[in-house]
Amino acid sequence: MSQPDLNLANIENLKRIYQTESSILWSRAQSVQIQSLVEENRFLNLQNFSAAFLGNRQLINQNTDDIFRDRYNLLKNTPTKNTNEKQYIDALEAQSRIDILEHRSKLNHVMQEANIMMAAINRQLSEVVEMMQETNDQLISFNNRNLDKNTELLQNVKQSPSSVESQQISAIEEENLARLKKLQVDAMELEKSIADVVHVTHANREAILKRTKHNETSRTQILETRKHLADQHLQIEKLIGA
């Protein structure tokens, strides 16, 4: 190959390297952005979980306890004139206890399902951590290998490179070109995959924000129930001991 042809081939290779480098570096930046968005979504999800379970759920359970406590006191303080009325009140008391037991049983099943899902999430998160740790080990090995290669090059640079045969150079160039073509294909595929994940991540953010709004609406409804309960308390207090 003549010198002009060699120069042209080198320029084409440099262009390929530059294009591939740009694509890979852009993918790295996009991956970091996705990690940031995913972490933000995880934090928002935890906030929503805390608001729904530790906040709203506890207030709802308190309302439930107060509602059935009021019903118990209401029935206990309802006067009866005969056996039939007494049996009716007793039946209502039993019905009330069954109501709350059914409610609690259904809630227990939901909580167990949630526990199973949370355990699976934790297992998946552990797998992600393990993958990151394995990747770090590979990165350390990669750095060590290339540090050794630098040491080898430092030793060789003291020798004349003219001793390198043209066949050896051609072999390196052919290998470089093959690797570069493979990298270009891989970079294009990765860009598409990253674009899909970005879309999903933004969609998740919208869904998370809707759940945040739902928590706020639920809190308003819960507090409205508390107001009605307060009014009901006063009425039942008048029945006690009347």
Image: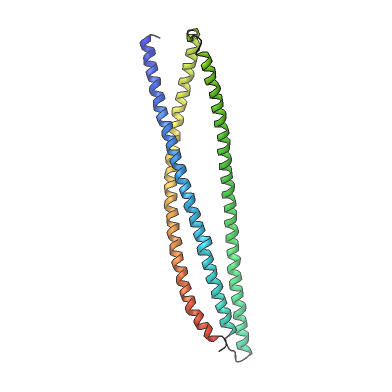
Q: Which sits in the foreground, 160 or 57?
A: 160
Tell me where residue 72 appears, x and y as whole percent.
58, 79
Q: Quadrant of the N terminus?
A: top left
Residue 103 against residue 17 in the figure, above or below: below
Residue 169 against residue 183 in the figure, above or below: above
Tell me how many marks there are. Answer: 0
Tell me where residue 164 appears, x and y as whole percent.
50, 9
Q: Which sits in the foreground, 183 or 63?
A: 63
Residue drawn at point x = 61 percent, y = 81 percent:
91
Q: Quadrant of the C terminus?
A: bottom right
Q: Which sits in the foreground, 64 or 233?
A: 233
Residue drawn at point x = 43 percent, y = 64 percent:
217
Tell me where residue 163 appears, x and y as whole percent.
50, 7
Q: Which sits in the foreground, 58 or 179?
A: 58
Residue 69 against residue 152 in the figure, above or below: below
Tell me where residue 138 appears, x and y as whole percent.
56, 31
Occupied quadrant, residue 76: bottom right
Residue drawn at point x = 51 percent, y = 79 percent:
233
Residue drawn at point x = 56 percent, y = 31 percent:
140
Looking at the image, residue 217 sits to the left or right of residue 122; the answer is left
Q: Residue furthest bottom?
A: 81
Residue 224 against residue 120 in the figure, above or below: below
- Which colour scheme appears in the figure? rainbow
Occupied quadrant, residue 82: bottom right
